[in-house]
Amino acid sequence: MRKDKIDHHLEKNRAYFNKLYHLPKNRDIVIREFRMGLNHKTEAFLAYFDGMVDSGAIIEGILKPLLNMDRPQNGKINPERIKEQVLVSNEVEIGENWKDTVAGVNYGMVAILIDGCNQSVLVDVKGWEHRPVSQPEVEQVIHGPLEAFNETLRTNIVLIRKAIRNENLVTEILEVGRRSRTSVAVMYMSDLVSPELLAQVKKRVASISADYVGGAGVLEQFIEDHPWMLFPQFLSTERPDRSAAFLMEGKVVIILDGNPTALIAPATLLSLLHSPEDYYLRLPYGNFIRILRLIAMIIAVVTPAFYLSIATHHQEMIPTDFLISLAQAREQVPFPTIVEIILMEISFELIREAGVRVPGIIGNTIGIVGALILGQATVQANMVSPILIIVVAITGLASYSIPNYELGFALREIRFIYTLAAAFFGFLGISATLFFTLMVLSSKESFGVPYLTPLAPNFKSSPDRLTRGPVWSMERRPEYLHPQGTRRQSKISRGWVISRPARRFGHQTPEKKGD
Amino acid sequence: MSNTAPTIKIQEKEAWTLGTLVISTKLFLGYPRIMVEEGLTAGWMIVLIGTVLSLFAWNGVMALMRKYPGQSLGQIYKITLGKIFGGLVNGLHLTIAFATCLIYMVQFYETICLYVLEGTPKWALVLLFTGLMILGAWFGVIPIARVSVLSFYPVLAAVSTVLILTLGEMNPYYLLPIGGSGAGNILRHGVINLSASIEVIFLPFLTPYLDFDLIALKRAGRSAILCSGVYFALVTLGYTMLFSLPAGLEYLTPFFQISRMAQISLDFQRLEMIFVLAWTFCVFARLAASLSFMSILAKSFTAKIPYRRLAVIFGLTVGLLAYFSEEGSHWAPIVVMWLHSYSFLIVFGLPLLAFGVHVLKNAGKKKVDPVENQI
């Protein structure tokens, strides 16, 4: 039976500790016994996991001070005194019971148990190996910061805090996983976030009752609104700058320890389509990319379906000369167009998957070789028509332009539905699937925020929808988040225009006196 | 913040685009043909007269709504006309909604069979239309309204594109004689053409789902009538100028025929299928909106049956009737003409009746402060 109270007798505590951690079978826990003080009368032991702590810090900050400490005049060792006067460490806690003690040890702290004390002293000397902060791999930009999250929660929090140097940025640490006890950081701007949204996020995270929550993706699945929906309901990012930007809008950032990805709630379809570079680039370039991306999204979803509709049901749309060359190209192909498309689409997905899974440069090679050789060979073998290779290649290229990995997945899957619908009903099938898709999307919400907002329903926000306005016009926070403050910059954010004639320098007009 | 129905209601813009969408779907069926049949070269005048009169009729409906702030039209009928007569009136609205829904489905699958996907089995199309209609209604009227916002501009763009692309083919001389079938005839048909906007009555019935006040509702309905009226007039004008009268009297698809004339180069002569995307999308939304409306209305009769179950029941009934109705092309035009000629009397006449009853009931009472009476 598990007990919770720490005993006064060190021997009993040691025995309980051994039992708790399956010693001596369990070889990665270290128990260091020693006698405290210059007179060496008081027995004690340290317990920690090998590799999770900084050994140097243990020697300098814990062992040396404890071995050299003076025995108090009353003869009693007081953990509070050790915490306040002896230990050379910036984070020391008193463990009132076994639960605190074990939780601390499991998370890389050193527990000190002293004979005669029914409390433990927990010293934070975490020092495990971790990947340094490196460049983003999925959300790369040419302009903008080149830092990405890594697997250390503390580092990830610091990366965001470095971007927002504000006392209202709050990080609450929750715990998920009954056995794994993984830390989850819920970050928000206390003076901006909607209290309902925050309460909902915390409620959902705290309510998870599972042994192990291993990744941000698993956490996402536990707390999302619609598990069967194809489209993602969280925005996952590896970029601290992006997380900071969303925090400043009034959203909530969730980071799971051991994961280089932050989840941002709530997510809307438009936010998934945006990329940080849209904002880092000047307005015309940023908007150009956004329009290009929108076109890419349409191409990625409906190009095979369009080709199939035209080739199978609506040939009259094709100019005569092109129709003849299309017929010639398909003359030798024994399969119906739908079979051709499905064959090539699946091949393309296989190449993509293989390219991702195979390590390093071989992966890229597989992609290129697969695409080139497989395409060429299938055409030469008259399995598919050359035009279809073009269709699949354009579709594949377009789907790579989607900035969000999960949204890319959703669009890839939905493409098959559109293609099948087009095979049966041509444009009518595409129209029917489009209607169904929009109905699904417009009926869903992420943490109470409609998925298609601010398009439908419409809410007051800055000009940042399909395209964006100038940065100085981004005056309002999105109202659909119900932030505590809606204005994020002054009506005239470019102070210098006040002293200049308004007409010459843009749309902003100087505020009148008394405004 | 749960995974149930949307928590945010229909906004003003969504309401007027929903209104426009449900009204203007008939643009893609035989509506321009009916106008030309009735007014000959002056069919477009009938449209304009009908639109102006619809605006007045809408004001009448809103006058009644103002007397009972916060109540839906269905509830107002029950308050003013009593439970039995009110229920009967609601039943009439339900019947009209059902009839139009059925007619639309029959006409559309016939159009698709004839022009878009020749030889497609009837069951496949009925299944597709019924399935989507039920799914749309299943999600509820709020998502339908949101979808109508998203589809509004693409559909508008598609109609405008067709008209612009066919400009070169239009012959203004086809509009002569300008008087058409004669002033009296045009005026009479103009009044009857109030029926073109009857779908705007969906909005006052949906009051519990609206996120705005009566003033905005009035604006939304007005915008829907005006917007669809303008496009009806433009398409009727274009139709008259594109086809000389004998050829113009097509049964199902005047707009489809117009879009066939669109050409951007010698090679691309057949673009009409692109526009199929826009008008079939409209139909799906229209059918789903009708079904949703029917289910909401029916819910006022029987609170015990849930909305979604009602949607499935009505949807399946419409689908089965559409499937088993043989030779829809024979009876559908008769029903269409009947609805066109008389439905406005029910849709716009009954609110006036209810208003009259309200006035009579309150004749001796002290007037209520209008400011206090506002939402």
Image (spheres, coloured by chain):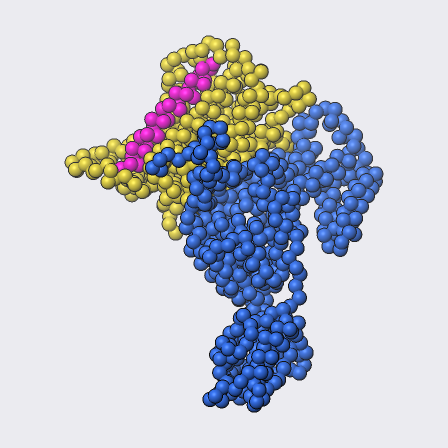
Chain colours: A blue, B yellow
- Magenta residue span: B39-67
- Establish if B277 lies above or below A228: above
Magenta-drawn stretch contains A4: no
**Magenta span dominant secondary structure:** helix
Magenta-drawn stretch contains B55: yes
- Tell me what residue is drawn at x 21 percent, y 34 percent: B360
- Establish if B305 lies above or below B339: below
- Tell me what residue is drawn at x 57 percent, y 50 percent: A241
Would residue A225 be seen by someone viewing this image from the given angle? no
Image coords of residue A209 (percent x, y): 53, 66
- Establish if A82 lies above or below A256: below
Give the mark count: 0
Where residue B219 sits, quadrant-wise, is top left
| Foreground of the two, B225 or A447 | A447
Would residue A469 be seen by someone viewing this image from the given angle? yes
- Tell me what residue is drawn at x 51 percent, y 53 percent: A164
**Quick one: quadrant of the C terminus of chain B?**
top left
- Establish if B293 lies above or below A49: above
- Tell me what residue is drawn at x 43 percent, y 44 percent: A487
| Foreground of the two, B106 or B200 | B200
